[in-house]
Structure formats: structure tokens, C-alpha cells
Amino acid sequence: MKFAILGCGHIATKMATAVKYLENKGMGVEAYAVASRTKEKADDFAQKYGFQKSYGSYLELVQDPQVDLVYVATPHSEHYESAKLCINAGKNVLVEKPFCANAVQSFEVIALAKEKNVFLSEAMWTRFLPAVDMLKEWIIAGRIGKVETIEADFSMNLTHVERLCNPALAGGALLDLGIYSLTFADLFLSDPRIAGEGNSIVKTESKSILYETGVDATDWINLVYKNGQYAYLKTSMIAPTHNVGIIYGTAGFIRVQNLNDMVELQVYNKSGALYKTVTPPKLVNCYEYEVLACKDALERGLRECQQIPHEKTMQFMKWMDSLRVNWGVVYPFEK
């Protein structure tokens, strides 16, 4: 699978590292091409990470007939146009999270992919991690009893990152960090094997403190589920770093260090004593798992990944839209 990266920013460097590892290990993925808005930047990126080709425009990259899959690594506000550019060129696409800036954009992109019959997926890497399956197996096996409550907090001071402070670039804590807290709750409380059949959110309470530019800076989201579970979620781009998720059950709890890449899993019994610590496996930096999932889906002739189907992407985009409405956060291009 000839892999291409559209956009050469920070997140692209992580994906490039993972892709090059897969290539070097002979795992059927080729670090093929990159594109930036300037040829110089693309050349530097390609040379540093070992990609064969570099383009000074996004259009040139999607017109390359050799490209099998394009990873969209542009800013949040650009995902919509970037994804459409790829799809209209007949390319399979993996779009970095959040999929788009809002649900309307997301619906259009998904509809276009179906019209053009190309593969499309959201690169929410957490959903592809082996650690997720490990956690679910433990819970289903009764390690912590019946799941009752989930807590998740992903916070770090990112006010030095200009795009996160800029409403025009779809900045704020929710789309960049909060989506991980929401995902952590959804992974377990939407799984009928863990939370029961037909579980859904029946009540949402949320509050946000806005940054001086108008984007959301710190968010609290409390969820009540149909089958009786609760989720207490927080995210902040101005608070000190805190990245932990906890799954509370009737017979113990599981503490997950890092909601996004799940670097350590700790199982506690009912009295609060730690009795098991596991460091989940990874090949390089965990970005590799979404790439391999896309490769598998393409080889099977699928047009989406089972780990995050289009329906799930749309659910999340609508969910985050409704939260922003409650907080009064509107991006300039939405007005």
C-alpha cells in the first residue's frame, strides 16, 4: 500500500515515523509521498522521514496515480476541503481526528466518498489500539464486576499552539483533546457486552470556560446512560497536564494512564489494592495500528473501518456540535 501524507505539520511527523517503520519491517506499507504548500517543506519532510516523493501542492499529490491511501494531516479547519480534494481525485482517505469541524461538513464528505466509491476513515487512533481489546476482555471476564461509572480527564496547557487558540482554525479544547475523553466513555459504555443492550445517553450536563479568543478552554461533560451508568469527563487546554481514565466497577476499577495511547493499564480490587499492571504492546508509536487497519479494510474491499464506521464518526460530530452550541462556541466559517 503506497501511503501518502497531505500536510507536513507536527501530527504528520508521528504518522511518518510509524509508516516508515512498517515499510522497514516488510509489513506491506510503503512510505511513498508527502505534500506541503511549499516544495521546500515537502522536500525536507520527505528526506527526513524517508518518503520517495514530495510535492509542493496538495493537488499534485492526489493526481499521482501511484498513491493508494492519503492521510490528511492539515489543521482541523482544513479537513473538509482536503478530504474532498482527495475523494474527487478518486483516492482512499484517512482523515486525522476530528474528522471535520462540524457534522454538516462530515456528512458531505462521507456522502461524497460513497458517491465516488472510495475508502474513507477517521484517524481516531485510540479506537485501533490493542489495549482497547485487552481492557474489554478483562471487563467482560468480570475482573472489576459490572461497570458503573467512568471518569476521564485529558488536559494540558496548549495555549502556545496558535491553531488551538484560533477560532478560524477550529481551535479549542474539545476537538483536539476533549474528543479523547468522549471516546474513552463511548468505547465501553456503548458496548452492549459491557454496558448492556440498547445503552444510550439520556441526559447531558456540560459547562465550558472560554478562552479570550472565544474558543473553549476548559470543558466539563457529565453523562447519564439509559442502563444506569454515569460518565464524568473533563478536558482543558489551559490546565496542567493530566491524562487519565478510570473505569469503575462493582468489584474494582481499572486506571488507564493516557486516554489517547493507553501506555499503562492498572487493575485494582474492590478494596483499592493494585494487583495487576500491564504495559500494552506497540510496534512503534501506536499510529501504526490505524494504518494496518486501513490496509486490511482495503484488501477486503471495505469502504470504512469497523473500528470507527462512518455512523460513529457522524455520531461524534453531531455530539460535539451540540456541546459547542450549549457553550456558545461558533467558528467564523460556520456563521
Image: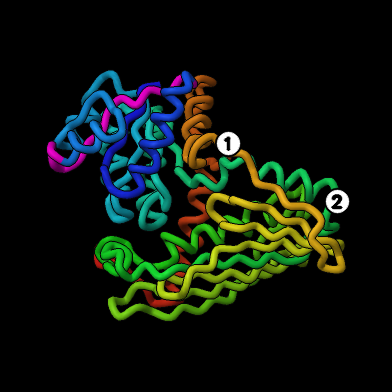
Q: Is residue 190 above or below residue 221?
A: above
Q: Position of residue 203 (x, y in %)?
A: 64, 71
The residue that mark 2 highlights is 142
State the image quarter where residue 67 is shown. top left
| Disc 1 packing (10 Å; few <14; some 14–19; many ≥20) | some
SS type, badge 2: loop
Identity, as a three-letter code, of the amino acid under mark 2: Gly
The residue that mark 1 highlights is 306
Mark 1, mark 2: which one is toward the viewer?
2
Q: Is residue 127 above or below residue 217?
A: above
Q: Position of residue 106 (x, y in %)?
A: 39, 49
Q: Is residue 126 above or below residue 24?
A: below
Q: Is residue 265 magenta?
A: no
Residue at 32% in and 41% down? 83
Identity, as a three-letter code, of the amino acid under mark 1: Gln
- In the rendered view of the protein, which quadrant contains the N terminus? top left
Q: Nearer the viewer, residue 109 or 206?
A: 206
Specify the segment rendered in magenta.
27-40
One can see residue 272 in this view:
yes
Which of pointers 1 and 2 lies earlier in the amino acid sequence?
Answer: 2
Q: Is residue 32 magenta?
A: yes
Q: CA distance from mark 1 to mark 2?
A: 25 Å
Q: Position of residue 238 (x, y in %)?
A: 41, 74
